[in-house]
Image (cartoon, rainbow, N blue to C red):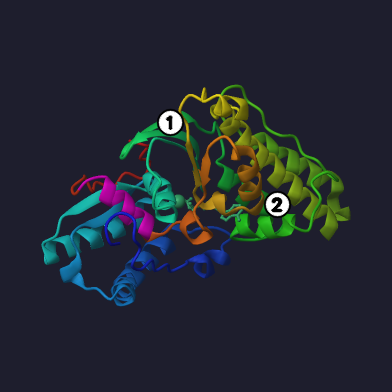
Amino acid sequence: MDGGRRVLSNVIHSQVDLHREFGGVVPELASRDHLERLPHLLDLAFAEAGAGPDDIGLIAVTRGPGLAGCLLVGVGVAEGLAASWSRPITGVNHLWGHIYAAMLARPDLEPPLLGLVVSGAHSDLVRMPGHGRFEVIGRTRDDAAGEAFDKAARMLGLGYPGGPALDRLARTGDARRRPLPKPSLPGLEYSFSGLKTALLYRLRDLGAEAGEQDKADLAAAFERSVVESLLEKLDKCLPTRGEVARRAGGGIQEVVICGGVAANTLLRQRAAEVVAGRARLTMPPLELCTDNAAMIAAAGFYGGSAGPTTVDPSLGWD
Ligand code: KG4
Ligand code: ZN
């Protein structure tokens, strides 16, 4: 990165092929692959950026949340580089990274903003009053949205990775033909485990009768329930269009929806409709929604030049 906004290279090695035959991420394989790939990825990143170690002013590395083994490899490699190049290093919160991905997509985006971070392990509504400051105002009681998509995809026989496969299948289905309940808790809390069970029962009732179209319709219904639930809570936090017209909106002018699930086709479409005329919406392009290095560099840049690199697999927003 050049500063906090300009991406010079963003190299991604996907482990999808490695984990596919196991139907999900195998932590030991994931961390070993990190160790094997990182040195080469670093060479690629420098080559693409036309830069070298001498150009580095700060090294940013994810300290959590995430899989312990992978985080340890990342921090170990980053600390080794910082020591051998004599450069400062900062530990970055992965969730902050997802928010900062939106700033790469929209150079004039600044806090305060309202964020909805939807990933494999999180469905969090956060207020960001300023750089490096976050306040969680809503979260899930059970499964995260991405986890729900992945489990639903497995039930529908779509394999791994589930979220994108379910997205594709839902495009050929009709959510109205086999509707599923929309989870609804009071306040700003999410819950997706009941919806998952509803899908399981629906599939069990259909049994061997379930054809390709039934599955596509159920995928569309599942996707709609998750998406409408996610947006219902966001809607509660936004001023109405009337309030915006009267300038009585209460301040939220920027909305960010990010994390892997923000790549979902229906979520992107519906979010634009829900937020239109009420605030400005930023959803990063697909390659910046799912995990990537540029977002960590950007968060590291704004988080200051030194931070703890202690690995914390269950780190919260602080
Ligand atoms: O942020 P991310 O890349 O990794 C984590 O930090 O967890 O998010 C991964 C999650 C997975 O659950 C994946 O199934 C989901 O994002 N995902 C999607 C789509 N693309 C990725 N879910 C629904 N529709 C998609 N198109
Ligand atoms: Zn992520």
Residue ID for mark 1:
136
Question: Does 122 sit left or right of 163 as displayed?
Answer: left
**Three-letter residue code for mark 1:** Val
Residue 5 image-quadrant placement: bottom left
The quadrant of the rendering that contains the C terminus is: top left
Q: Which residues are magenta?
A: 294-304
Separation (CA) of disc 1 from disc 2: 31 Å
Q: Which residue is mark 2?
A: 155
Q: Position of residue 17 (x, y in %)?
A: 53, 70
**Helix, strand or loop: magenta stretch:** helix
Disc 1 vs disc 2: Cβ atoms closer than 8 Å?
A: no
Q: Is 268 contained in the magenta span?
A: no
Q: Position of residue 74 (x, y in %)?
A: 30, 59
> Please, is residue 183 above or below residue 297 in the view?
above
* x and y percentages locating residue 112 in the rendered image: 39, 35
Looking at the rendered structure, which numbered label has been put on residue 109?
none
Q: Nearer the viewer, residue 297 or 149?
A: 297
Looking at the rendered image, the quarter that the N terminus falls into is bottom left
Give coordinates of residue 155: x percent, y percent. Answer: 70, 52
- Secondary structure under tag 2 reads helix
Which callout, 1 or 2, points to the residue nearer the camera?
1
In the image, is residue 297 part of the stretch drawn in magenta?
Answer: yes
